[in-house]
Image (cartoon, rainbow, N blue to C red):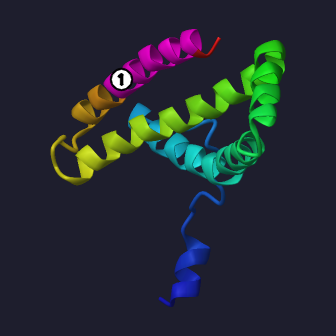
Amino acid sequence: MTFVTFLMTHKRPININLFKIQLPLSALLSITHRISGILIFFIVLPVTAIALSFMYESQQSYDNFVNFYSTNSFIKLIFISLVLIFQYHIFTGIRHLLIDFHLLAENLSSSFRSAVITLLLFLFNAIATIRIML
């Protein structure tokens, strides 16, 4: 049997619908860690660089930015979101490093437990960050 006939005779899924599959929590954290990394590279870093370059121009531009931040709720929401994306990436990255260094077991129950702990730590940190930044 050739490889082509093997592929034609065996029924395999053509595309996988990720909305129908129940992924484990650790898999969702892994996927969202990658997504947050992409968001950091394409959104968080450029916006941060633009904001910092604007603030470093002079004392007046810094005061203008601080005044604009403190009076505009939408800008606050954007910067809080950017900080939370970065913090989420750090928390899940530390979890991945602990798994890579074999400090956390790689079975399903311990990966679920570490995912829950990571999400709880991020949630507490996010609440504290939002309270500080508002």
Q: Give the amino acid at mark 1.
A: Val
Residue in view at x 57 percent, y 76 percent:
7
Q: Can the viewer see residue 22?
A: no
Residue 105 drawn above or below residue 134: below
Q: Can residue 30 be seen in this view?
A: yes
Q: Which of 81 and 133 is in front in this view?
A: 133
At horizontal 52% and vertical 18% (from top left) the residue drawn is: 129
According to the picture, the residue beneath numbered tag 1 turns out to be 116
Q: What element carries label 1?
A: helix
Residue at screen point 63% across, 54% down:
41
Where in the figure is residue 40, as x and y percent of width and height?
61, 47
Return the residue found at the far bottom.
2
Residue 16 vs residue 78, the one in the foreground:
78
User: x and y percent of residue 68 in the render?
Assistant: 83, 22
Magenta residues, as a range?
116-132
Q: Describe residue 81's horizontal placement relative to residue 120 as left or right.
A: right
Label 1 crowd (10 A; few <14 / some 14-19 / many >=20): some
Tell me the quadrant of the picture where the C terminus can be found.
top right
